[in-house]
C-alpha cells in the first residue's frame, strides 16, 4: 500500500511541475490521499487488516489513481 501511495504522490508532484494539474486539483487529490491514510490507520488500529478492509483500501487507491489520470488529462492547466 505504502509504495502505491508514494507513486501516486509522485504522479501528483510531477503533474504540478509540468502544469498538467492546477493547485486546486492537486490539493483535492492530496486530500483524497490523506483520507485513505486515515482509513488505513483506523483499519490497523485493532492490529489486523482484514481481507475486506484491504479490498476497500485497494478500491480507494484505484479510484484515486483514476482521478489523478483524469485531472492530469483534462483541459485545465496551471
Image (cartoon, helix red, strand yellow):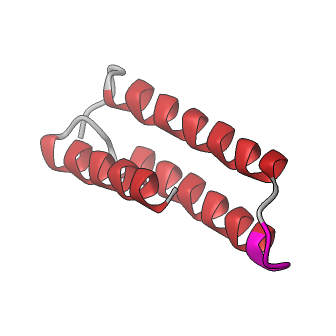
Q: Give the image quarter of residue 13.
A: bottom left
Q: Which residue appears at 36% of the width and 21% of the height?
A: 74
Answer with left or right where residue 60 lies relative to residue 25: right
Quarter of the image with the C terminus in it:
top left
- Which sits in the foreground, 15 or 19? 15
Q: Which residue appears at 68% of the width and 49% of the height?
A: 57
Q: How many marks?
A: 0
- Which residues, given as a range, are shown in magenta? 44-48
Single out the residue that lies furthest toward the left.
18
Would you say residue 61 sits in the magenta stretch?
no
- Which sits in the foreground, 75 or 41? 41
- Which sits in the foreground, 42 or 27? 42
Answer with left or right where residue 35 lies relative to residue 50: left
Instruction: Answer above or below: position of 48 versus 55.
Output: below
Principal secondary structure, stretch drawn in magenta: loop
Q: Which residue appears at 30% of the width and 40% of the height?
A: 21
How far from the left and from the top, in percent, is residue 38?
68, 69
Q: Which residue appears at 24% of the width and 42% of the height?
A: 15
How far from the left and from the top, in percent, is residue 19?
19, 40
How far from the left and from the top, in percent, is residue 55?
73, 42
Answer with left or right where residue 43 lies relative to residue 58: right
- Which sits in the foreground, 67 or 27? 67
How far from the left and from the top, in percent, is residue 47?
79, 78
Amino acid at each position: 500500500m505504502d509504495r502505491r501511495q508514494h507513486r501516486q504522490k509522485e504522479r501528483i508532484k510531477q503533474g504540478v511541475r509540468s502544469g498538467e494539474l492546477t493547485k486546486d486539483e492537486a490539493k483535492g487529490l492530496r486530500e483524497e490521499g490523506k483520507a485513505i491514510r486515515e482509513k488505513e490507520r483506523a483499519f490497523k488500529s485493532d492490529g489486523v487488516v482484514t481481507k475486506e478492509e484491504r479490498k476497500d483500501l485497494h478500491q480507494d487507491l484505484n479510484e484515486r489513481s483514476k482521478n489523478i489520470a483524469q485531472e492530469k488529462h483534462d483541459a485545465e492547466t496551471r
